[in-house]
Amino acid sequence: MIFFVVITLQVVAQSDEVLLTIDQHEVSKDEFEFVYNKNNSSLYSDADRKTPKEYLELFINFKLKVVEAENLKMDTNQTFINELAGYRKEIAAPYLTDIDFNEHQVEELYRRMKLEVNASHILLGVDKDASPEQEQQVLDKITNIRKQIIAGKPFEDAAMEYSEDPSAETNKGHLNYFSAFTMVAPFEDAAFNTPVGEVSEPVRTDFGYHLIKVHDTRPNKGELQVAHIMKNVSRNATPEEKAKAKMAIDSIYQLLLNGADFAALAKDESQDRRSAVRGGEMPWFAAGRIVKEFSDPAFALKNDGDISEPVETPFGYHIIKRLSARPVPPFEEARASIESQIKKDAARQASGKKVFVEKLKKEYNFSENEVAKVKLAELTIAGTSALPEETFFTIDNKNFGAEELTAFITQNNIKSSSYLSVYDNWVTDEITNLEDSKLEEKYPEFRYLMNEYHDGILLFNISQEKIWNYAAQDTAGLEKFYQNNKDNHLWGDRFNGHIITCKDVSVREEAENLFGAGLNADEVLAHINTDGEELISIETGAWEEAQNPVVDYYVWNGKDPENFDSATTFVRGDKIKPEPKTLDDARGLFISDYQDYLEEQWIKELRNKYKVKVNKKLLNSIEGV
């Protein structure tokens, strides 16, 4: 694939006006303008921006290195090929989806975020990998249930009688209000697209088939953050146990009315221990994400700080305190979150992919052999029967048959039992691969971006080999460069000497006398620090201004250092004038300079080695940023 891409880039470039030629490598005007505008417009300072002529000189230097890397076959290295392929896969992804549909999906989901739907459902479970016979059996059954409802059977009665959702026994299928991203995508799609008062057609999800009745819609109230105090009541609680819990919650409520601190009571009394340790604070929630018996009284609280009377839920008794509320955010604020939700939702991704594939089918004249496709339904992958030697479909005048299907199954390690079950994925894979192979041809900006990655990786690799690693390892060359350029990095004015810290004033006087007598630092230490007791410490070195606060104080008239006693601390030494830093002192700086020198020499060599031809008339037609 990568070799195909490189060839495609070269072929397409030849159809554009050629601005620059380096050793038979052509660069079009469009490609140069793309790179120039992208890099130049990103600079904040006008002083840093280049005219097209100025930028071209930098671009030529860049391209010379890339051409050299290609001539050294660095683009055939497997590591390079794999790295480029990884980048290509990443930047190709947005081109392999339907942008218009994705935008429509984002807008539609935001519209749903502003609404809440009140609905009920009936579920007939069926495994997501069920056989066609099982699927049809359940579909027939739920279709019959729908006919009964349309004919007048109350939805609640049908839910109690038929639904395999365990909660239907108590809620009669009622789900309360919910908004976008609360239910799985196919369920949500049906709920938001079914008119109020009507029953949906059967809806397939991973759980099975559903019928959905929409009771009402209303504007989304947004999200709440609350704290609560809870007394648990189990489902099997006796009347006495329930009464005891009710008495306890009423007692707590009375304490709150008398001014008790809610958070403190929650920590001491609430039996929801996960929230109790936080003063009862719960995560943000929207209607539909928590039981109706809790969410309704919570959303009924008008102001932050308001407290509800005790309320009963299937889990026990609660007192709710409103902490904060936030409405549905504006569209542009919500966009990133919606797009993230779509990416995490396989069903929504699949619907976008389906729209994209249908467009590609039209573009590439997709045709299907329905007779051969029917034969696939009779065969299993693990069976002994051979695939029919027929064309199953054609894309862009290329036929796909048994050989390609077998290769697809093998490459993807597919374990499904039915050929027909993988057929649609096979079609999607083949037509997407075709589109992928044509991205450089169809989208110039993609081609130029791929060129950037291709050239950028090569530039890094050859620079690392020729300049960066070489400069660090060429000790003889670096030493010679240092000797010729040592004055490029000088020390400033420095103090060369000692910082002496003494235990007390008498030790200082003794130390000053010893220094005055001509003893050096080691001799002073040995003379004073006897019997293992440290009465004096001496730090030796050379310091520029602002490198040591004690030296600054004595030598550069600086401010008093922190925790400093001038009676017991002093310095001895001399100021020294600027002098070259040694190679060890400034190795990093000299290596950097040496790299610059090597690159400068390398560019001269490359400019002599390769012929560079510029279409000046074309260059003059390019407008600067």
Image: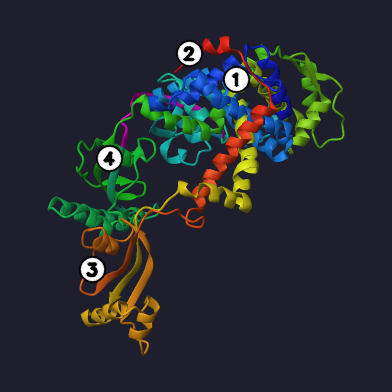
Placement of the C terminus among the 4 image quadrants: top left
Q: Quadrant of residue 57?
A: top right
Q: Quadrant of residue 305?
A: top left
Q: Is residue 485 left or right of residue 45?
A: right
Q: Which residue is mark 4?
A: 298
Placement of the N terminus among the 4 image quadrants: top right
Q: Which residues are magenta?
A: 208-223
> Residue 488: image x %, image y %?
46, 46
Residue contact between numbered discs 2 and 4, judged by CB atoms under 8 Å: no
Q: Amino acid at mark 1?
A: Phe
Secondary structure found at label 1: helix
Task: Residue 356: give its label.
Answer: 1
- Separation of disc 4 and disc 3 at Cα? 62 Å
The main secondary structure of the magenta stretch is: strand
- Separation of disc 4 and disc 1 at Cα? 43 Å
Q: Is residue 182 magenta?
A: no
Q: Which residue is mark 3?
A: 564
Q: Amino acid at mark 3?
A: Phe
- Separation of disc 2 and disc 1 at Cα? 37 Å
Q: Quadrant of residue 16?
A: top right
Residue 345 lies, with reference to residue 281, above or below; the image says: above
Residue contact between numbered discs 2 and 3, judged by CB atoms under 8 Å: no
Q: Amino acid at mark 2?
A: Glu
Q: Is residue 36 left or right of residue 508?
A: right
Mark 2 nearby-residue class (10 Å; few <14, some 14–19, many ≥20): few
> Residue 58: image x %, image y %?
54, 27
Q: Which residue is mark 2?
A: 623
